[in-house]
Image (tube, rainbow, N blue to C red):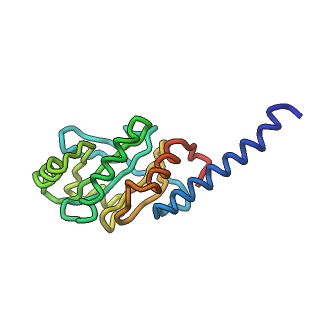
Amino acid sequence: MSRFARLVPFALVLSAISSLALADSLADMGVLAPKERMPAPDFSLPSLHGGEQRLVDLKSKVVLLHFWATWCAPCRKEMPELHSIWGDYRERGLELLCVNVDRGNRKGVESFMQDIGLHFHTLLDAEGAVRNDYEVRALPTTYIIGRDGKFIGRIVGERDWQGGAAEKLIQHLLDGDLSQSL
């Protein structure tokens, strides 16, 4: 038996273990995984600090696409935690896009971001078009999008982004090949 033939079963076992570990991490964070991984709809939104951001420009990164509003108390609580985890993992390929859905409250969004010292991509969806495309019905809602631009899952409601479950999930997402998983 060739050396390659002996390694194939070992690689398959490792792949299965990795898939199970990812599935456990998703469950621990309450992530709702899709039945089939579909491409996330592309969009272009203005950034709070100028310019436009397109989702397609972040292909090859794991994206947390977080919908929030300044009037949403759980959203406000989560923002510093998301900022922290993004800071810990952005060099490894994690991107955080926070889509604000306040209508016509740019100054309120600017004030909130300055007051708590957050410095990540804040996008403005004042018309609600992206929110509607992503079928956001409650806040906060976070979509996890893989490096391949496809949905990994959705989180509805507040989560502990500083806990061990979040760290474990982010590490699995950044380390894994999701093309054969889920």
Q: x, y (%) of residue 101?
A: 23, 58
User: Vertically, is 46 above or below 105?
Assistant: above
Q: Residue furthest top?
A: 3
Q: How many marks do you count on the picture? A: 0
Q: What residue is shown at x 27% (from left), y 43% (from top)?
A: 120
Q: What residue is shown at x 26% (from left), y 60% (from top)?
A: 77
Q: x, y (%) of residue 99?
A: 27, 52
Q: What residue is shown at x 41% (from left), y 61% (from top)?
A: 155
**Quadrant of image for the N terminus:** top right
User: Vertically, is 59 above or below 143?
Assistant: above
Q: x, y (%) of residue 9?
A: 78, 44
Residue 102 vs residue 14, the one in the foreground:
14
**Quadrant of image for the C terminus:** bottom right
Looking at the image, residue 4 sits to the left or right of residue 96; the answer is right
Q: Residue furthest bottom?
A: 137
Q: Residue furthest right?
A: 1
